[in-house]
Image: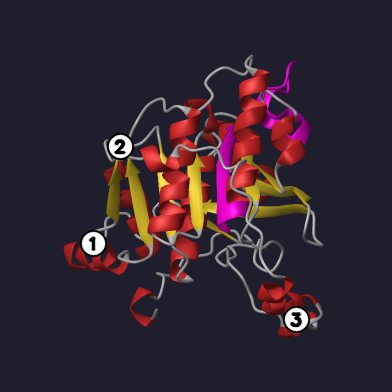
């Protein structure tokens, strides 16, 4: 099964500050990156992306960057980023899931449903999925609050000892609990950016948005300016992506299942609000398949199982 990183592991060696250890390298060590910078777009090596939705080829989850995934409470941020993590595993990225609000087994069960595109995978597929995750997926076995320095230590350990490439922190409110503690939020994001750059990992941080005032409530999609807490989250992160569920559609269909207008509406809107080192910013519309917990490109499209055996 996916390997667990227990929270009682001794991370003392990774609690150090990185300011005192500046990595100085010869310029020639960047020869590969320099050559790639001048490659034609079609010749560049593709990096990690979310290939299972319309975000494909619109954003890459590059080494040394931090992405904030933001949205209102209850708008399926964790479910969407779980599908994103599954895509990364298929591409043989080495992924750490640090979900502080859900037990590892629950996270894995949801990802297994997404992988096989069914409500209840067969026992043989569950076993195959567990085996397939080896070398691709790790879980941090900790629920509840965690100190920011300890969180950074886990990331350093994963990057240095396990050669990790992608880390998902879900969510920031379990690391920096109060939106009033602006300085602590700013420091955490600063540390995350520094850690990503020093170790060449990509750090994904799930954050919350303030619910807008007025009658519209969360029926209005959020923007990067709606992130709860410090502006440093959107300012310092390389990428900001908002996740919004169409709750108005759900309410309309609950009232009238034959509402023709509501039936044509998408179930979700994913917007790349900021991409510092990429060319595309904008929103895509997606639909949600309840049985598989998968987000799809088209209405009523039936998700297909991931080709795990071929990877």
Q: Which residue is tagged 2?
A: 7
The structure residue drawn at horizontal position 43% and vertical position 33%, both measured from the top left corner, is: 150
Q: In the image, is residue 193 above or below residue 47?
A: above
Marks 3 and 2, how far apart in space?
41 Å
Name the foreground residue: 56 vs 63.
63
The structure residue drawn at horizontal position 33% and vertical position 57%, both measured from the top left corner, is: 112
Residue 185 location, quadrant = top right
Which image quarter is the N terminus in?
A: bottom left
In primary-sequence order, the first of circles 3 and 2 is: 2
Of helix, strand and loop, which one carries label 3?
A: helix
Which image quarter is the C terminus in?
A: bottom left
Q: Which residue is tagged 1?
A: 126
Q: Where is residue 48 in the image (x, y as percent from the top left)?
A: 58, 66
Range of the magenta residues?
A: 198-227
Q: In the image, is residue 83 above or below residue 45?
A: above
In primary-sequence order, the first of circles 1 and 3 is: 3
Q: Which of marks 1 and 3 is in front?
A: 3
Q: Position of residue 86 (x, y in %)?
A: 45, 60
Whether residue 105 sits left or right of residue 218 in the image: it is left
């Amino acid at each position: 099964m996916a390997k667990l990183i227990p929270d009682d592991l001794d991370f003392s060696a990774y609690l150090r500050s990185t300011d005192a250890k500046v990595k100085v390298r010869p310029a020639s060590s960047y020869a590969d990156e320099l050559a790639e910078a001048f490659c034609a777009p079609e010749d560049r090596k593709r990096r990690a992306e979310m290939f299972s939705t319309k975000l494909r080829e619109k954003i890459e989850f590059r080494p040394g960057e931090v992405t904030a995934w933001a949205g209102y409470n209850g708008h399926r941020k964790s479910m969407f980023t779980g599908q994103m993590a599954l895509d990364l595993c298929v591409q043989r990225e080495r992924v750490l899931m640090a979900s502080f609000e859900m037990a590892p087994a629950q996270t894995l069960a949801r990802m297994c449903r997404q992988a096989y595109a069914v409500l209840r995978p067969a026992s043989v597929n569950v076993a195959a999925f567990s085996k397939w995750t080896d070398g691709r997926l790790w879980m941090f076995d900790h629920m509840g609050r965690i100190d920011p320095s300890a969180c950074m230590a886990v990331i350093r350990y994963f990057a240095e000892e396990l050669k990790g490439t992608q880390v998902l922190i879900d969510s920031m409110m379990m690391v920096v609990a109060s939106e009033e503690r602006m300085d602590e939020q700013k420091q955490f994001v600063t540390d995350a950016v520094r850690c990503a750059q020093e170790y060449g990992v990509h750090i994904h941080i799930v954050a919350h948005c303030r619910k807008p005032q007025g009658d519209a409530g969360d029926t209005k999609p959020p923007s990067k300016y709606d992130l709860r807490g410090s502006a440093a989250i959107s300012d310092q992160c390389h990428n900001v992506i908002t996740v919004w569920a169409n709750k108005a559609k759900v309410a309309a269909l609950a009232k009238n299942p034959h509402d023709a207008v509501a039936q044509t509406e998408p179930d979700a809107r994913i917007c790349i609000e900021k991409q510092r080192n990429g060319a595309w910013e904008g929103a895509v519309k997606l639909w949600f398949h309840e049985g598989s917990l998968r987000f799809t490109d088209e209405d009523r499209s039936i998700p297909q199982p991931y080709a795990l055996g071929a990877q």
